[in-house]
Image (cartoon, grey):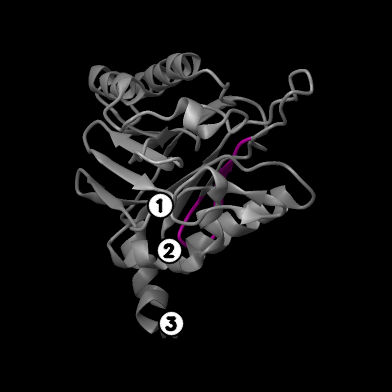
């Protein structure tokens, strides 16, 4: 499967970000990418109140992404905020193109002095979707700290797990990101593709960067196949998902695991 990692720093304007998504998706489709993965919050940076940007899953922003995927003949995964009818919204991954799905982030980042749950309502279900003959699992940012989600997705048949992310910088955070992406690939014996927002400098002191870049591709044995830098970048990689079956046969972690919860 040919996959594009579309690493960029989202602004606080959904219309501007939609234009970026269209252009990057077009560039990826020109390189025959079957799946184009954008960061968490590609619709609107975390620097803006979530409810100010949130729309229904069939609203204009999602419709624009759907149209881009249809026009380009590719499948897109992009992070957005969706309405719930209440005070809080959902942190959602939109999947559109040859497959249609949504995943609402289950694990909310209430850690390190931050409370994502103040504005976000958690999802409740793990989600995997079928693209051609392949199964792709979905996770978002802080989810990567929870191996149980990744092994569950693998048991659902996921050979590839994509992880759109807005990984805020801080002491040790890049090391943690690299370690967690590698560990989750080994835990689940799956390919892991993590796509972060790029590192952008604070504008005028009004907002902080909302990503560190370093989007990654890790194979089921934990080998890092690709790691980007911290700037905006589009990278395309070919993954042989047939390798997953062989790794799981030689290293049957999913069969051997004992469940204690």
Q: Which residues are magenta?
A: 218-228
Q: Which is closer to the viewer, label 2 or label 1? A: 2
Q: Nearer the viewer, residue 117 or 18?
A: 117
The quadrant of the image that shows the C terminus is bottom left
Mark-to-mark CA distance, 2 and 3: 13 Å
User: Where is 16 relative to 150, above or below?
Assistant: above
Q: Earlier in the sequence, mark 2 or mark 3?
A: 2
Give the residue number, with chain letter if any, for mark 1.
161
Quarter assignment of residue 2: top left
Is residue 219 magenta-colored? yes
Q: Secondary structure at mark 3?
A: loop
112 left or right, relative to 84: right
Q: Which is closer to the viewer, label 2 or label 3? A: 3
Q: Earlier in the sequence, mark 1 or mark 3?
A: 1
User: Where is 83 relative to 73, above or below?
Assistant: below
Q: Position of residue 243 (x, y in %)?
A: 36, 58
The label number, if any, that marks residue 261 in the structure image: 3
Give the residue number, with chain letter if any, for mark 2.
149
Is residue 53 magenta-colored? no
**Residue found at x 72% / y 31%:** 208
């Amino acid at each position: 499967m040919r996959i594009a990692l579309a690493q960029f720093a989202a602004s606080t304007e959904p219309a501007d970000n939609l234009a970026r998504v269209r252009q990057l998706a077009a560039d990826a489709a020109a390189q025959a990418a079957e799946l184009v993965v954008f960061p968490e919050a590609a619709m609107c940076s975390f620097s803006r109140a979530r409810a100010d940007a949130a729309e229904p899953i069939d609203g204009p922003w999602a419709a624009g992404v759907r149209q881009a995927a249809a026009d380009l003949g590719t499948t897109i995964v992009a992070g957005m905020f969706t309405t719930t009818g209440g005070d809080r919204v959902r942190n959602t991954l939109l999947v559109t193109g040859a497959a249609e799905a949504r995943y609402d982030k289950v694990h909310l980042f209430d850690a390190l002095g931050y409370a994502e749950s103040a504005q976000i309502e958690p999802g409740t279900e793990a989600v995997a979707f079928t693209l051609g003959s392949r199964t792709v699992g979905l996770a978002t940012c802080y989810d990567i700290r929870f191996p149980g989600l990744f092994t569950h997705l693998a048991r659902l048949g996921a050979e590839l797990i994509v992880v759109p992310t807005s990984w805020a910088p801080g002491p040790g955070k890049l090391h943690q990101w690299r370690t967690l992406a590698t560990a989750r690939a080994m835990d689940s014996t799956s390919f892991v593709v993590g796509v972060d927002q790029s590192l952008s400098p604070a504008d005028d002191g009004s907002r902080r960067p909302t990503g560190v870049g370093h989007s990654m591709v890790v194979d089921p044995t934990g080998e890092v196949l690709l790691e980007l830098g911290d700037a905006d970048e589009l990278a395309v990689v070919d993954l042989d998902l047939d390798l997953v079956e062989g790794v799981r046969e030689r290293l049957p972690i999913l069969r051997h695991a004992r469940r204690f919860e």
